[in-house]
Amino acid sequence: MKLCMIGTGYVGLVSGVCFSDLGNTVYCVDKDIKKINSLNKGVVPIFEPGLEEILKKNYKQKRLFFTTDLKKAVLNSDVIFICVGTPTKKNSDSADLKYVFNAVKALKKLISKYKIIVTKSTVPVTTGDKIEKILKNLKNKKLVDVVSNPEFLREGEAIRDFIYPDRVIIGTDSKKANKILKSLYLPIIKKSSRYFNTSRRGAELIKYASNSFLATKISFINEIANLCEQTGVDVKDVSLGMGSDQRIGDRFLRAGPAYGGSCFPKDTRALIDIGKKFKTNMSIVKSVVSSNNSRKLSLIEKAKLILNYKLTNKKITFLGVTFKPNTDDMREAASIPMINYFNKTNCKITYYDPSGEKNEFKHLKNVKYSNSLSAACLNSDLIILHTEWNEFKLLNFKKLVKKNNFKVFDMRNLYSPSKMKKLNIKYFGIGR
Ligand code: UDX
């Protein structure tokens, strides 16, 4: 099949590359000429394990093209995926749809033969209706079908998530569009997943409901972790005990810092906003957002308590600062408010992250990036294990710190409290 991906951000690029690997011809379009030029040289602008290899392979085999020429890409494609960003509008919780509508307006001028227009970008329920309204003339002439096909890729696991999705959701009442999209997804549906054809509005809402539910699960276990700390229970036991009930499920029950990333914070807020527009109080999601915000502050308090509120001249080391491992993404990372807070005290902060130095901290006078794990840990008073990168899972803290009385705040519960006790290391986890 011939496909056009509008937008080479996370969703557009990963899906485009993976669709080409399934044997389709894919045109990835972006307005950003620099990005297109570098993609044409095989340089991938995002940190995603495995992506570069698949990109280069399909590019060589001339199944994958990067271009700024929307017209050429559209004329050569049967299905057009809109994969542009839908960031939160300034001073509001709403998703900003200007990039989506700009793409649709551009398409309106180019289509003269039947095409399926698919929104992969996360868009509020009824956006498909608005797109169809813009394309009314084409729709009346049966030249377009507008479909919602939300994307559930996780950063750092995107290739695997694409090839082995739990489900593929196609929101359309057009039998023709559904048949074509089913055949496009057939190679991956066969392997593992459920193919689900629903209404377009249903598909749009499924995406927000899924992300908000996962954020709820995380916030729930984080609050249970707070209670565990007061009652001497290990939250890992609670996650395991709860998660073994198949009705609950054991995934996304890891207590840790406030959740972050490009999706959960944005999509929970957008769902509250959608609820407001349709006069429905999303009270649970509102509590989740507020619980997650308070968590950022309460964990700063916990770190201060670990240091007995004696911060002057203390060296604090952050291991990992990204919102999760296997990505260089800093969006909404819980490390940002923490490091900003400690920068304003008399502490010296050093951080090490396998994905490199971060612009977010370059201007902070008490914050230093170290490109070596051991140099970052040397002589530290408090090691804060913020992101669970694999290389942090088997550390010999004593060898690294080379100093007495240092403390470890393991925000991802990677280490065993009893083993740490045996080693005589002052260890603090989350909810244990
Ligand atoms: C998420 C959704 O999982 C994905 O389906 C959607 O397409 C985009 O948003 P992503 O943001 O890449 O993916 O990361 P995810 O692995 O879901 O983690 C999000 C946040 O939750 C991270 O801050 C992570 O550390 C946190 N998390 C996740 C927990 O604190 N505990 C968990 O058990 C799981």
Image: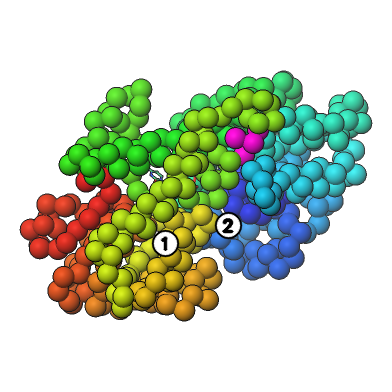
Q: Residue at x 52, y 36 (%)?
A: 286
User: Which quarter of the figure is the N terminus placed in?
Assistant: top right
- Decide: few, some or many residues near mark 1? Use Cα within 10 Å; few <14, some 14-19, many ≥20: some
Q: Secondary structure of the magenta portion, mostly?
A: helix
Residue 335: quadrant of the picture = bottom left
Q: Quadrant of ligand 1?
A: top left
Residue that extends furthest to the front in the rendered view of this protein: 309
What kind of residue is marked 1?
A: Met
Location of residue 341 in the rendering, given as x and y in whole percent from the top left corner: 43, 65
Residue 281: quadrant of the picture = top right
Q: Residue at x 71, y 68 (%)?
A: 34
In screen coordinates, is 110 left or right of 65?
A: right
- Asked whether 56 or 316 is in front, the reply is 316
Q: What's the magenta region?
A: 270-274
Regarding mark 2 in the picture, which secondary structure is present there? helix
In screen coordinates, is 44 left or right of 217?
A: right
In screen coordinates, is 393 left or right of 419?
A: right
Say the numbered circle drawn on residue 55: 2
Quick check: 254 above or below 389?
Answer: above
Quick check: 24 above or below 37?
Answer: above
Residue that extends furthest to the left in the rendered view of this protein: 422
Disc 2 versus disc 1: nearer the observer: 1
Residue 208 part of the magenta-drawn span = no
What kind of residue is marked 2?
A: Leu
Q: Which residue is drawn at 35% across and 29% down?
A: 249
Q: Do the residues labelled 2 and 1 touch (CB within 8 Å)?
A: no
Instruction: Return the residue at label 1.
Output: 338
Q: Can residue 99 be seen in this view?
A: yes
Location of residue 334 in the rendering, given as x and y in whole percent from the top left corner: 44, 56
